[in-house]
Image (spheres, rainbow, N blue to C red):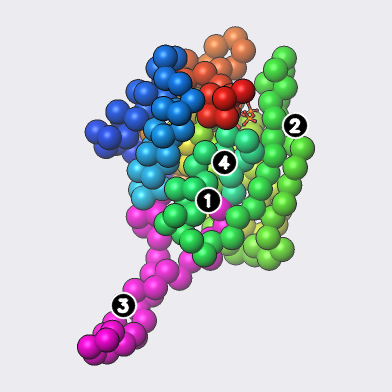
Amino acid sequence: MHENVTVVRHPLLQHSLTILRDQESDTAAFRRHAAITASFLLIEVTRNLHTKPVEIVTPLTQTTGDQLEERLVIVPVLRAGLALLPAAQNILPDVPVGFLGLERDEQTAVAREYYRKFPNELSDYKAIILDPMLATGGSIEETIHAVMKRGCKQIIIVCVVAAPEGIERVMAAHPDAQLFTAAIDSHLDERKFIVPGLGDFGDRYFGT
Ligand code: PRP
Ligand code: URA
């Protein structure tokens, strides 16, 4: 496996992922466990962010603390990426958010863009792209192009389930990108759905 691909492991994450995979899980359970999954992923994704020392004064004395020094932008891929956004905003409360709306054509599995709204200035920013399903990799590739066009230099991809085909495609095109996932599954079926997967994440999360 590529050195920049990390499979995040934690017993509670595996537990939640199993509930996401189970076709018997209803919308409420799916949302609850998507949120837990997202929290574990985001903690891991942010583990190696850089900080700089800062002098502060506590109510008792002066001391040195650490301050995040990276310029970050969070980019959820609509719709399903919205499921990972609250966890990202919880731990990165002051980080701007850019949106890209993509929808796969049901026949061709090729993603079509229908919405784009990014912060104005993203030169040299690190983009944290949120999309729970990495299938063919087409949606993530589109998203990487879009944020790089706006000036982002470093890319972190956060997904819940990834297919080997999608990982190959994205990492071949962007070997410096970092990818975090809760699972690498077996393969894509003839409709380009991930197997064993969990079905259509967006439909299950939003109850459509
Ligand atoms: C799903 C998923 C990813 C994409 C992955 O979105 O959320 O964005 O497919 O497939 P790919 O790797 O083959 O591009 P979908 O198009 O179903 O839209 P949705 O998020 O609105 O459900
Ligand atoms: N999008 C999904 O939601 N699920 C898949 O298996 C593939 C793409």
**Circle 3 crowding by C-alpha within 10 Å: few under 14, some 14–19, many from 20:** few
- The residue wearing badge 4 is 82
Q: Tell me the kind of residue under disc 4.
A: Leu
Residue farthest toward the top in the current orientation of the protein? 190
**Of callouts 3 and 1, the N-terminal one:** 3
**Of callouts 3 and 4, the N-terminal one:** 3
Q: Tell me the kind of residue under disc 2.
A: Arg
User: Residue 174, position in %: x, y?
Assistant: 56, 43
User: Residue 206, position in %: x, y?
Assistant: 57, 29
**Circle 2 crowding by C-alpha within 10 Å: few under 14, some 14–19, many from 20:** some
166 left or right, relative to 26: right
Is residue 79 part of the magenta span, yes or no? no
Q: Tell me the kind of residue under disc 3.
A: Gly
Q: Quadrant of the N terminus?
A: top left
Q: Residue 128 has which mark?
A: 1
Marks 4, 2: nearer the viewer: 4
Q: Tell me the kind of residue under disc 1.
A: Ile
Q: CA distance from mark 3 to mark 1?
A: 25 Å
**Of callouts 2 and 1, the N-terminal one:** 2
Residue 67, compared with residue 98, is above or below; it is: below
Q: Residue 65 has which mark?
A: 3
Label 4, secondary structure: give it. Answer: helix
Residue drawn 34% across the image and 30% down it: 16
- The residue wearing badge 2 is 112
**Of callouts 4 and 1, the N-terminal one:** 4
Is residue 52 part of the magenta span, yes or no? yes
CB under 8 Å between callouts 4 and 1?
no
Label 1, secondary structure: give it. Answer: strand
